[in-house]
Image (spheres, rainbow, N blue to C red):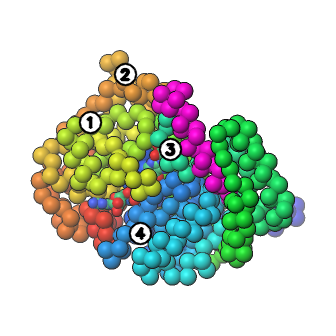
Amino acid sequence: MSESGCQEPATRPGIPSVGNRVTVVLGAQWGDEGKGKVVDLLAQDADMVCRCQGGNNAGHTVVVDSVEYDFHLLPSGIINPNVTAFIGNGVVIHLPGLFEEAAKNERKGNSLKDWEKRLIISDRAHIVFDFHQAVDGVQEQLRQEQVGKNLGTTKKGIGPVYSTKAARSGLRICDLLADFTHFSERYKVLARQYQAMYPSLHIDMDGELARLKTYVEQIKPMVRDGVHYMYEALHGPSKNILVEGANAALLDIDFGTYPFVTSSNCTVGGVCTGLGMPPQNVGQVYGVVKAYTTRVGIGAFPSEQNNDIGELLQSRGKEVGVTTGRKRRCGWLDLVLIKYAHMINGFTALALTKLDILDVLPEIKVGVAYKVDGQTIPYFPANQEVLLHVEVQYETLPGWNTNTTAARSFDELPENAQKYVCFVEEHVGVPVKWIGVGKSRESMIQRF
Ligand code: GDP
Ligand code: IMO
Ligand code: MG
């Protein structure tokens, strides 16, 4: 207490202590970097794993005891029976998709035991309806017809549902659990708006509403006020809280290669807005980087290799989308874009995955700068026309021509593989904490 009678600032009730620190895992390229695997590894010591943005456009693979699980909406960490999984307000939820995903993974093994008791859903999360997914398809078709090019979306309704959220006509989990008659009326208003916009669209309103009603009792025990839930988790007893980013920096609605992006913030800001937590609670921010680059869908890709190298990376890396089954485009590692992702996210360390895929290459190129009109540019261009025409400056590093999949420590990696890792960390200015040399949990080398 000061002489004036005021409490000392630090003890005022309005200024609570920072509370638990949250570890964040984010994609640093165009997605599919191996976030699921990194999250699974960290989830072994976690109490809570959260998703803060995106929907079931994400596809995260986790391999445990040779069983391959894929997660789209459920946080991958749910595979650890001690973990509580939290889907925050920034996520968009297709309820049939959520239950199908859980059932599919449950059939594969024992790892999803009691998942319904371990899943918490924010009441502020928006609902993806079947018609959002249908509209996604129609919009893609129209783009193709009208401008000769679509976006290559996953057709999971992501663009349409975030549009209705921004237009303030969306419906949330809290609406579904309140008065179903009122919910149905608002649902029909929204559906009719889309029907008026796209006359060819057929929407089975009564059918979808009947299906949605069946989920009400099922999800009721899982739903909480997400802000209060998160606050209690942050300020209760010490907890290990992990956030699993979906999609990736170059797909971010603000910072990605717009318009060839998704519709949410997949960078660190999305963690606070998508969970309702203050930035002070963010601790480690881990960037997941694939040892080369891949992209699914349309859009500029400066280091893409439309040649034997691209094909080799695609086939050795089994680069096929988990959500859509599309072949991923492949190219050399591009450190210009990793540095750009670091400027936005402030990575505290990196996980470099799929190093083993490079095992057979005699030499490996790494993009280190972009030139425009013969001049090196010190930034990542916003304009897609510029990005399409940048000249990537490469450094060529010697390969290692050795199988690395059995390596379990940094010292066990061939010297040239070690040099490749050091080149990445020195160029980006962020330490590489993990190196992936295979799909399984064990095939992740931890350096410190
Ligand atoms: P996410 O979306 O970032 O979680 O990544 P995906 O699961 O879509 O794609 C990554 C793919 O690479 C999955 O099939 C993983 O099993 C696989 N993978 C992850 N890390 C490694 C690694 O270090 N080596 C190899 N060979 N495969 C890996
Ligand atoms: P994970 O979490 C790779 C891409 C789509 C498309 C664009 C827009 O597995 O890394 P959308 O359906 O979101 O409107 O599609 O974004 N995309 C992804 N690409 N991995 C992802 O997620 C992606 N999520 C969206 O291919 O180009
Ligand atoms: Mg993926």
Mark 4: amino acid = Tyr
For marks 2 and 1, give the one nearer the viewer: 1
| Residue closest to the eye, 103 or 48 | 103
Answer yes or no: do the residues labelled 3 and 2 have beta carbons within 8 Å? no
Lower position in the chain sequence, tag 1 or tag 4: 4
Q: Which residue is mark 1?
A: 306
Q: CA distance from mark 3 to mark 2?
A: 29 Å
Q: CA distance from mark 2 to mark 4?
A: 43 Å
Lower position in the chain sequence, tag 3 or tag 4: 4
Q: CA distance from mark 3 to mark 4?
A: 23 Å
- Give neighbour class at mark 1: few <14, some 14-19, many 20+ (Cα, 10 Å): few
Lower position in the chain sequence, tag 2 or tag 4: 4
Helix, strand or loop under label 3: loop
Mark number, residue 196: none
Q: Residue at x 48, y 67 (%)?
A: 76
- Vertical position of residue 341 compared to residue 85: above or below: above
Lower position in the chain sequence, tag 2 or tag 1: 1
Residue 206 occupies quadrant: bottom right
Q: How many tags in the picture?
A: 4
Answer yes or no: do the residues labelled 1 and 4 have beta carbons within 8 Å? no
Mark number, residue 153: 3
Q: Classify mark 2 as within 8 Å of ligand 2 or not, answering yes or no.
A: no
Q: Classify mark 3 as within 8 Å of ligand 2 or not, answering yes or no.
A: yes
Residue range highlighted in magenta: 123-149
Mark 3: amino acid = Thr
